[in-house]
């Protein structure tokens, strides 16, 4: 049994691969299995999360930064990765927010 199973989310795995709908099972803080589109019926979690219509990504997505200038001299934006950030989102104009943006 997994600790957590996240079901039906759109997985962005950080490898550059296309997004896909999948279930993700987590045990002891590590990914146990990923099922595309779904895990086997016998994979259950102590906690089940319905992520339909939501993004599922490793790490922390920082959608509020002030890196617009810093990215010019620090392409790794190093202070963020020191704190577990794996993705930084730049929104140039609030009117262009995508439907997935909840900020």
Image (cartoon, rainbow, N blue to C red):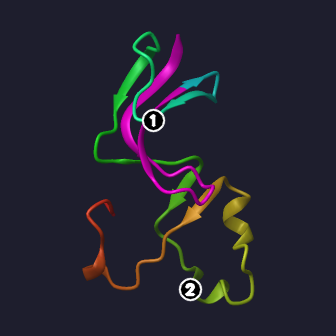
Q: Nearer the viewer, mark 1 or mark 2?
A: 1
Residue 17: percent from the left, percent from the top? 56, 56
**Residue shown at 57% from the left, 62% from the top:** 87
Q: Nearer the viewer, residue 34 or 96?
A: 34
From this view, report whether residue 16 is shown above or below residue 8. Answer: below
Choose top left, top right, bottom left or bottom right for residue 51: top left
Q: Which span is picked out in magenta?
A: 1-25
Callout 1: SS: loop
From this view, report whether residue 87 is shown above or below residue 39. Answer: below
In this image, 52 relative to 92: left or right? left
Residue 40: percent from the left, percent from the top? 44, 18
**Residue shown at 38% from the left, 22% from the top:** 48
Q: Is residue 35 magenta?
A: no
In this image, 2 relative to 46: left or right? right
Callout 2: SS: helix
User: Which mark, by number, is residue 1?
Assistant: none
Q: Nearer the viewer, residue 23 or 29?
A: 23
In this image, 98 relative to 87: left or right? left
Residue 89: percent from the left, percent from the top? 49, 70
Q: Residues within 10 Å of mark 2 (few under 14, many from 20)?
A: few
**Residue shown at 66% from the left, 83% from the top:** 71
Residue bearing mark 1: 36
Report if the CB atoms under discs 1 and 2 are less than 8 Å apart: no
**Residue shown at 49% from the left, 57% from the top:** 18
**Who comes first in sequence, dot 1 or dot 2?**
1
In this image, 7 relative to 78: left or right? left
Q: Is residue 11 magenta?
A: yes
Residue bearing mark 2: 68
């Amino acid at each position: 049994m997994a600790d957590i199973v996240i079901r039906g989310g759109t997985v962005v795995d950080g490898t550059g691969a296309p997004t896909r709908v999948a279930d993700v099972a987590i045990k002891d803080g590590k990914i146990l299995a990923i099922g595309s589109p779904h895990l086997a019926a016998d994979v259950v979690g102590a906690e089940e999360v319905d992520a339909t219509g939501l993004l599922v990504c490793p790490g922390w997505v920082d959608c509020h930064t002030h890196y617009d200038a810093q990215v010019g001299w620090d392409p790794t934006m190093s202070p963020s990765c020191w704190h577990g950030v794996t993705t930084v989102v730049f929104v140039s104009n609030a009117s262009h927010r995508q439907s997935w943006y909840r900020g």
